[in-house]
C-alpha cells in the first residue's frame, strides 16, 4: 500500500505523474499490473488496503534487509550498503514520457575465497574472468521471501520466479553505474533466517530490462493517447483469481465485488453433495482420533525398529532372518543414494527458456487441518 502523504523514500506510490508531466514508475513496482500503476498515478482512492498482518510481514522483511548485507560482509563480500536514512535515488528514462526510479540496496564485489572464485570461473564466466575489487562494482539487490517463495527462487532462478527483481537490479545498474552489468540477487528465507545469492550475467539482466521496458512502453503509449485521465485505465494484466489481483490495493475499483448468491442459488450451483455442520464436526473429531492413533503407532514402530537395528548390529551381519507371525522376515540395513541438483550453478549456466524445459513446475491441492 502506498501512502501519498508519507515522506519516507521507501513508501512512495507505485506510480505518479511528475511536475514535468512524465509518468514515473517505482522500480520495485515494475511487475505490477499496468492498470494498478494507472490507478496509483491518477491517485485513485485505495479500496483494499494492506491488512495489519500483511503490513507487519512487509515491514519485518524490509527491516531484515540490512541483516542480509551484514551477513554477506561477514562471508567475505566487499559491499557498500545504502544509507537507509538518506538513500541514493536513481532515475532511468524509458522514452520521452516514462521514467523508472528507485533506491538501490547496495553495490559491491563477490568474495575472493578460493571456493567462490572457482565457482564463478567454472560455472559463470567459463574461466575467462572473475570479479575482484580491481573491477567495477555490481548492483546487489536484497530480497526477503517466505520459505515457499525462497525455495521457488532457489530452484527456478530469479528470472523465472521473480523477473521484476532482475529488471529492478538492471534499473539500478543503469542509474548508478551507467550500464547494465552482472547483477546479484541476495535473498533471505524469513523462516529459517538463512540466505543465498544468485549472480545473473549482464546480457540476461539487459534482457530483463528490455522486457520490462517493452511492457511499460505500452503504458506510456496509453498515457500519450488519453493523458492522465483517471476514467481511462488500460487493460488488466492478470486474471481475477491471480495473487496479483487478490493482493492489489485497487481490486474493488478495478473489479467491483459481485453480490453473493442467495443460499438457494448457491445450493443449486454447487457441484458437490451438501454436508451438514454436524457431519463435518463428526468427521473432524474422527480425524483427530485417527491422527493421535497414527502418532502412537508410529512411535511404537520406531521403537521396534530401533530394537531390531540394535539386534542386527549385535549379530555383526548386514542382514538376518527372524520368524514373523505369518512368515519368516528378513531384517537388514538398506542404504540409498540421492542426487541433488545445484540450482545456483544450473541457473548460472542456462537462460530462463532452457531452464523452463529442464526444471518444470507442477501444482496440486489437498485439504489440510491445522
Image: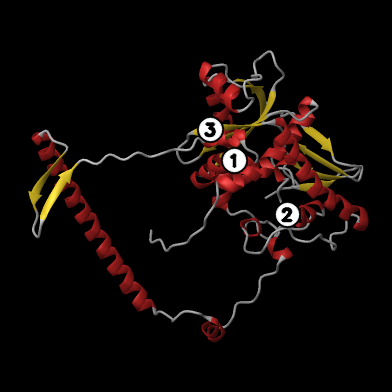
- Residue 152 lies, in percent from the top left, at 54, 45
- Residue 306 lies, in percent from the top left, at 16, 42
> Which class describes the residues within 10 Å of circle 3: few (<14), some (14-19), or many (20+)?
some
User: Upstream in the sequence, badge 1 or badge 3?
Assistant: 1
102 in relation to 219, above or below: above
Instruction: Judge left or right: residue 159 versus residue 61.
Output: right
Label 2 belongs to which residue?
33
CA distance for labels 1 and 2: 22 Å
Residue at image location 84% in from the left, 59% down from the top: 230
- Residue 70 lies, in percent from the top left, at 55, 24
> Which class describes the residues within 10 Å of circle 2: few (<14), some (14-19), or many (20+)?
some
What is the count of numbered marks?
3
> Which class describes the residues within 10 Å of circle 1: few (<14), some (14-19), or many (20+)?
many
Residue at image location 51% in from the left, 33% down from the top: 195
276 in relation to 100, above or below: below
Label 1 belongs to which residue?
157
Q: Considering the numbered disc 2 on the image, is that residue within a helix, a strand or a loop?
A: loop
Label 3 belongs to which residue?
196
User: Upstream in the sequence, badge 2 or badge 3?
Assistant: 2
- Residue 272 lies, in percent from the top left, at 47, 79
Q: Considering the numbered disc 1 on the image, is that residue within a helix, a strand or a loop?
A: loop
Amino acid at each position: 500500500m502506498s501512502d501519498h502523504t508519507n515522506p519516507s523514500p521507501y513508501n512512495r506510490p507505485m506510480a505518479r505523474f511528475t511536475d514535468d508531466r512524465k509518468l514515473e514508475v517505482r522500480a520495485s513496482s515494475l511487475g505490477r499490473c499496468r492498470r494498478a500503476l494507472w490507478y496509483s498515478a491518477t491517485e485513485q482512492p485505495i479500496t483494499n488496503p494492506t491488512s495489519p498482518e500483511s503490513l507487519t510481514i512487509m515491514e519485518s522483511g524490509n527491516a531484515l534487509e540490512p541483516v542480509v548485507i551484514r551477513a554477506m560482509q561477514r562471508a567475505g563480500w566487499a559491499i557498500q550498503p545504502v544509507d537507509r536514512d538518506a538513500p541514493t535515488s536513481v532515475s532511468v528514462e524509458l522514452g520521452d514520457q516514462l521514467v523508472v526510479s528507485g533506491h538501490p540496496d547496495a553495490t559491491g564485489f563477490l568474495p575472493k575465497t578460493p571456493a567462490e572464485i572457482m565457482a564463478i570461473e567454472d560455472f559463470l564466466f567459463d574461466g575467462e574472468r572473475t570479479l575482484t575489487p580491481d573491477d567495477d562494482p555490481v548492483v546487489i539487490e536484497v530480497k526477503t521471501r517466505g520459505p515457499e517463495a525462497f525455495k521457488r527462487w532457489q530452484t527456478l532462478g530469479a528470472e523465472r520466479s521473480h523477473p521484476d527483481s532482475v529488471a529492478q537490479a538492471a534499473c539500478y545498474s543503469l542509474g548508478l553505474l551507467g550500464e547494465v552489468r552482472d547483477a546479484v540477487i541476495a535473498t533471505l528465507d524469513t523462516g529459517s533466517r538463512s540466505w543465498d545469492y544468485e549472480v545473473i550475467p549482464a546480457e540476461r539482466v539487459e534482457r530483463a530490462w528490455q522486457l520490462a521496458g517493452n511492457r511499460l512502453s505500452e503504458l506510456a503509449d496509453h498515457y500519450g493517447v488519453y493523458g492522465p485521465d483517471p476514467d481511462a485505465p488500460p487493460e488488466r494484466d492478470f486474471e481475477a483469481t491471480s495473487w496479483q489481483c487478490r493482493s492489489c490495493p485497487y481490486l474493488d475499483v478495478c473489479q467491483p465485488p459481485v453480490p453473493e448468491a442467495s443460499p438457494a442459488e448457491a445450493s443449486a450451483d454447487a457441484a458437490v453433495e451438501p454436508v451438514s455442520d454436524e457431519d463435518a464436526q463428526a468427521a473432524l473429531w474422527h480425524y483427530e482420533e485417527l491422527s493421535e492413533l497414527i502418532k502412537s503407532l508410529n512411535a511404537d514402530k520406531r521403537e521396534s525398529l530401533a530394537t531390531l537395528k540394535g539386534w542386527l548390529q549385535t549379530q555383526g551381519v548386514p542382514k538376518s532372518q527372524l520368524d514373523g507371525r505369518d512368515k519368516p522376515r528378513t531384517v537388514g540395513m538398506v542404504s540409498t543414494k540421492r542426487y541433488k541438483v545445484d540450482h545456483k550453478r544450473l541457473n548460472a549456466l542456462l537462460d530462463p527458456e532452457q531452464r523452463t524445459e529442464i526444471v518444470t513446475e507442477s501444482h496440486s491441492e489437498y485439504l489440510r487441518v491445522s
